Image (cartoon, grey):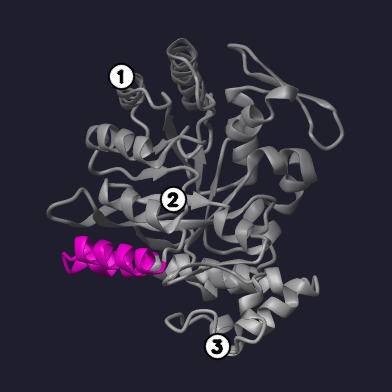
Amino acid sequence: MFTVTCQASGTAARLGTIATPRNSFPTPAFMPVGTQAAVKSLTTQELHLIGAGIILCNTYHLYLRPGVEVMAAAGGVHNFMKWDGSLLSDSGGFQVFSLSALNKISDEGVAFRSHIDGSRHLFTPERAIEVQETLGANIIMAFDECAPYPADESHLAKAVERTTRWAERCLAAQKRKDQDLFGIVQGGVSPALRRRSTQDLLSLGFPGYAIGGLSVGEPKELMYNILEEITPLLPQDKPRYLMGVGSPDALIEGVRRGIDLFDCVLPTRIARNGSAMTSIGRVNLRNAEYAKDFSPLDAACGCPVCYQYSKAYLRHLFMGKEMLGPRLISLHNLYFIMNMMQEIRQAISHNRLEEYRRDFYERYRSRGAGF
């Protein structure tokens, strides 16, 4: 399913292609997040327009609503949401563990209450695989324990041990052979535990490997340090997926360290608050300075939003609480990220990723903008 087509010199960055029964798409790639079988406010046609080859759906949320029976009757997520590209489903682990006040963890699995109606549920590795096989995503994830940040070494060690045991059970439970099951490396910001988790999962022979438990509050430099420890240990011929990362700077730094896949809700989440990603940094459209600014949101952007609308109009939509505002900025932000990934791939192919990175930081720092 994965082929490396170019290895950069001077960094661990590489170009590749992932092929699924649905399509093929180039890597490094960013996956828009369609938590409940919908990328917030966007249609599947618009996702094709911005160049998305794969999107992510959320097992926990779809399990609770509309439910496994509905998803089975619909013929899986692809048919349900009318998406003909590739899909990755997470295991529900991060969502279950993030609702710590509602769950109880044991070696069997995680007992939790629904955040919707308070009903009781039990997610085990076997159940997580069963639900994901019903959803029908092309890439599915092992059920893991995602420890919080910060966490002490003892807590992290137990989470790593449980993640390994659960990974073995996920492999044993898998019945469908048309889905690729990825293992998830855990261990927090402990290099030693990350190495242990990596070696444990490598011995199980997954077709791809994710790095979980990062971008959960730790400083970015710690995340980058962990990537430098882990990615050299992962197989060269299998895809590497950094979970929950989507800021422009982290995408560049992740690619430099050998990551092939990313996902994050950041582009659409900040869009709903009036914040736009641009080539010179983040722009808050609620600021009064844009009230009479009739220039495009980003003159360097080729998306339909920047082609048609001014900052003044977009600000007006937010100030007037028009739903069109968040929708347009969501489209722009995802276009920006997808276009950035294309530029990164081009830079790797021409062996100029470090030059691209330098130019990127100079643009942002000259304006003092955030990521």
Q: Nearer the viewer, residue 251 or 93?
A: 251
Relative to 109, 316 lies left or right: right
Q: Nearer the viewer, mark 3 or mark 2?
A: 3
Judged by its main secondary structure, the magenta piece is: helix
Callout 1, which amino acid?
Ala
Separation of residues labelled 2 and 1 (CA atoms):
24 Å
x 41%, y 23%: residue = 187
Q: Nearer the viewer, residue 246 or 161?
A: 246
Q: Determine which residue is flagged by label 1.
A: 192
Question: Label 2: few (<14), some or many (≥20) within 10 Å?
Answer: many
Q: Nearer the viewer, residue 218 or 168?
A: 218
Position in image of residue 252 (x %, y %): 33, 56
Q: Nearer the viewer, residue 368 or 56?
A: 368
x 60%, y 86%: residue = 293
Q: Nearer the viewer, mark 2 or mark 1?
A: 1
Q: Secondary structure at mark 1?
A: helix
Q: Nearer the viewer, mark 3 or mark 1?
A: 3
x 79%, y 34%: residue = 115
Q: Determine which residue is flagged by label 2.
A: 262
Question: Label 1: few (<14), some or many (≥20) within 10 Å?
Answer: some
Q: Determine which residue is flagged by label 3.
A: 295
Q: Is residue 176 above or below residue 169?
A: below
Mark 3 and mark 2 residues within 8 Å of each other at the beta carbon: no
Separation of residues labelled 3 and 2 (CA atoms):
32 Å
Mark 3 and mark 1 residues within 8 Å of each other at the beta carbon: no
Of labels 3 and 1, earlier in sequence is 1
Q: Which residues are magenta?
A: 341-367
Callout 2, which amino acid?
Phe
Mark 2 and mark 1 residues within 8 Å of each other at the beta carbon: no
